[in-house]
Amino acid sequence: MRIVAIIQARMGSTRLPGKILKKVNGRPLLSYQIERLQQSNYINDLVIATTIDEKDDLIVEFCEKNNILSFRGSEEDVLARYYETAKAFKAEAIVRITSDCPIIDVQVVDKTIQYFIDNNFEYVSNTVERTYPRGLDTEIFTFAALEIAYNEAVLKRDREHVTAYFYTNPDIFKISSVRNEIDYSKYRWTVDTEEDFQLIKNIIENLYSNNPQFTLHDTVQLMETNPDWFNINAHIEQKKL
């Protein structure tokens, strides 16, 4: 099975514009995420799916400079952008990652992919039933399922959020969830705001130099050692669908 990881990325974030290219230790957040995903045992190709808007020229330039595959599509119809990217790169299964998750744990990603492969599901995620920190979000689905969603989804929510059509239609798709043994869903390790960025900056600056592939458990341990860090972004609310 040809598995392609597609990272949706754009510069036009409403709460923190340009966040994915904000730098920690002189490197853009996006570069940390890519480096971590490149360690996967299952992903055959990794593609940055950005938009045709000129402000996202910076993302394409970053990809070209760093020999990263990229594809440009609709800014609003992200489902179409995913479908067109997956088709262009001949994906049989797609791992969906959002670019605001710079410290994603590749072990968590591979666990989700393995579960998907072993059980012959059409859609698997660790987000619908959340036990992992926000920021370790991983979804995987078949190209056949993506094509159905692309052709049939009409709601703006489903076109914008890509996978909503899967988990709101469990009668159509064979879906399941991956859960962690311990519920760490209280943690927020995604980057939507300046507070989020400050926390991620703290984590990377403390862990990366000694272990570039630091894990979920390494980060939890660091957070427990610095309990005040939890309050940096605890008040931030995730945008609703």
Image (cartoon, rainbow, N blue to C red):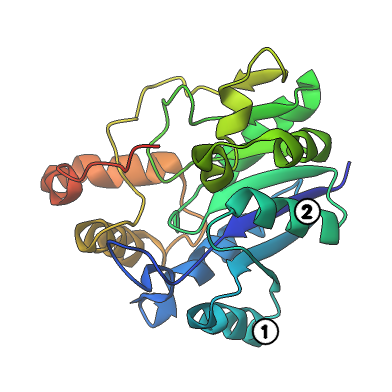
Q: Residue at x 56, y 38 (%)?
A: 158
* Left or right: 143, with 152 as reference point: right
Residue 147 rendering spot, x and y as whole percentages: 79, 40
Marks 2,1: beta carbons within 8 A: no
Q: CA distance from mark 2 to mark 1?
A: 19 Å
Q: Nearer the viewer, mark 2 or mark 1?
A: 2
- Quarter of the rendering containing residue 50: bottom right
* Left or right: 142, with 22 as reference point: right
* Left or right: 180, with 227 as reference point: right
Residue 129 rendering spot, x and y as whole percentages: 46, 21
Q: Residue at x 42, y 32 (%)?
A: 132
Label located before the other in sequence (2 or 1): 1
Pick whichever, 138 or 170, lies toward us: 170
* Residue that lies at the very extreme toward the front in this rendered image: 154
**Kind of residue at badge 1:** Glu
Residue 172 rendering spot, x and y as whole percentages: 72, 17
Categorize mark 2 by other alpha carbons within 10 Å: few (<14), some (14-19), many (20+): many
Pointer 2: what residue?
86
Pick whichever, 181 or 56, lies toward us: 56
Badge number at residue 64:
1
Q: Is residue 216 above or below residue 209?
A: above
